Amino acid sequence: MPIFAAVSLRPVSPFVPVDPVEDVAACRWLGAALLLVLALRLWGLPTLTLPDYDSVRNWQIVQEVAHGNLTHLFHHGSPGFYLLYAPVAAITTDHRVFLLLNALLAVAALGLMTDWIACAARLRGPETALLTLLAGSSVFLTFSGRDFTMSSASLLALALLLRAHWQRLRHPSRAALLRTAVVLAVGLSINYKFLLTVPILVVLEWQQADGLMWRRSNWWRVLLILAAPFAVLGLLAWVVSGVPVYRWPAVYFVIMFPAAANAAGRQGTVQVDFAYYLRYLAEFESPVLLPGLGAALVWFSGGLRQRPLPISAYLLVWAACTLAGMSLLIKAPRGLLFGYVPLYALAVLWVQRWPRGLALGLLTAAVLYNGWRVQQQIYAYQPSHYPQVAAWLRQHRIPRVVTTVGISLLPVAGHLDVQSAKNPAELAALRRQGYRYVLLDDYYRVAGVPGFDSLRTLPVVAAWPEPLLASPLLYLEHSEFTGQGYAGTLARQRQAAQDTVQLLLLRLP
């Protein structure tokens, strides 16, 4: 059987008979919902630049890889991500192309995952569409679908992993197990955070208790599949660019056990806080999520004793383990990346137990509520004004500028010389090298990097608003970097949001 046979679309299980007419209708409902989600994700996208430091670094690295420089291939333990986009970077460096492709990838991932859930749960067409719209209008998934990080590709890998592993549990065989291992290896090459799926898979394998994984003829094959990308890409980077073959696993070690504090002063990865994600879900995501999770713990947990697991119990394991596990580590909304769609699906499966008219009405209202929240938390913080900054600098013949921590000016800078200072010492060094202007970019506030507030006493040459730099979501996404808790992060955001401009061009004395 072909390795990726398990990831094809309908039907998921031969035990679920499929009426061809109903199947076509369901696909139409799903397709229509995905088009609406795509419109939601693309609205205003061409007016944005790359929104954060990681997005810009990823944009730079894919260009390096496209030109055969693999020095930073293992940055963030994500070689698969850079190799995926390197062919695009060989054709164009326009950041908007990368934003568009990443948004399309996120919508494709959503479609794969909701189609699988709908098949496994035997959802009708309208329920499938509402599940897709509800999860697709998630505030965080919409926000993360408009950057250039590994989130979209990770969701796609997760969708393939869930489909493959679900088949492995339903129809145990060596082929199904190895297909799951292949998809897991792909996910690990895309995002180091895919490691977080491993404990969940272990829990599910333990619950399955069929011993398939632990048979002598299977476990070493799984290990070989998982080790293959590390060996192949490690050797490739060493041959092409002289990168040490141990660089990729070393990245994991450094991330988990940092030797020194980062620029914001945060050190360590353990941060026990069970309220952070509950508060985020309550205040930013749909109000059906937490009641849905609570109801799932009551109504669906009985399915954990069944072999194989029903889809409701399977999704409950993914959602609950993701929420519990990430509550022990440093926090940011992206920590629940692998749990958002399962959480929304659990809410839909819970509501589906109600009278159908009431359920459809409630889900429709929940979708409209999500759209309103997307307007409040995402659309309200666009467009970007970095292109105007670059145009002003060119117009006034200022070829060199330093920015404070943030590098979102780079993708629109053209031939301008833009350098980032991550602390006042670096700024002073660049001043000695002849840089006379600094763009006081409020990204330093978002990232919690101290030392730049004193620059506000300098005369202002020009100023521009940059709404995204006052976004609560952007601040929360950087709480993982700063180590700040939920309340402290939003307090800093509210204080920064009092300013009407976020980009100040200053002349250094």
Image (cartoon, rainbow, N blue to C red):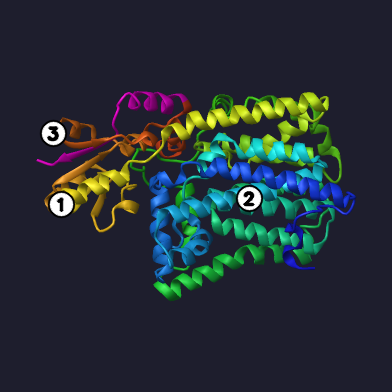
Crowd around label 2: few <14 · some 14–19 · many ≥20 (10 Å): many
Please give the range of residues in magenta: 487-509
Where residue 126 sits, quadrant-wise, is top right
Any mark on residue 139, and which? Answer: none
Crowd around label 1: few <14 · some 14–19 · many ≥20 (10 Å): few
Where residue 139 sits, quadrant-wise, is top right
- Residue 101, above or below 479: below
Quadrant of the rendering where the N terminus is positioned:
bottom right
Residue 263 screen position, x and y as percent: 33, 42
Left or right of residue 131, residue 244 in this image: left
Q: CA distance from mark 3 to mark 2?
A: 48 Å
Crowd around label 3: few <14 · some 14–19 · many ≥20 (10 Å): few
Comes first in the chain, label 3 or label 2: 2
Q: Nearer the viewer, residue 118 or 365?
A: 365
Q: Residue at x 47, y 27 (%)?
A: 486
Q: Residue at x 33, y 34 (%)?
A: 445
Mark 1, secondary structure of its residue: loop
**Residue 249 covered by magenta stretch:** no
* Residue type highlighted by circle 3: Pro
Comes first in the chain, label 2 or label 1: 2
* Residue type highlighted by circle 1: Arg
Left or right of residue 176, residue 186 in this image: left
Give the label, 3 or 1, closer to the camera.
Answer: 1
The residue singled out by tag 2 in the image is 109
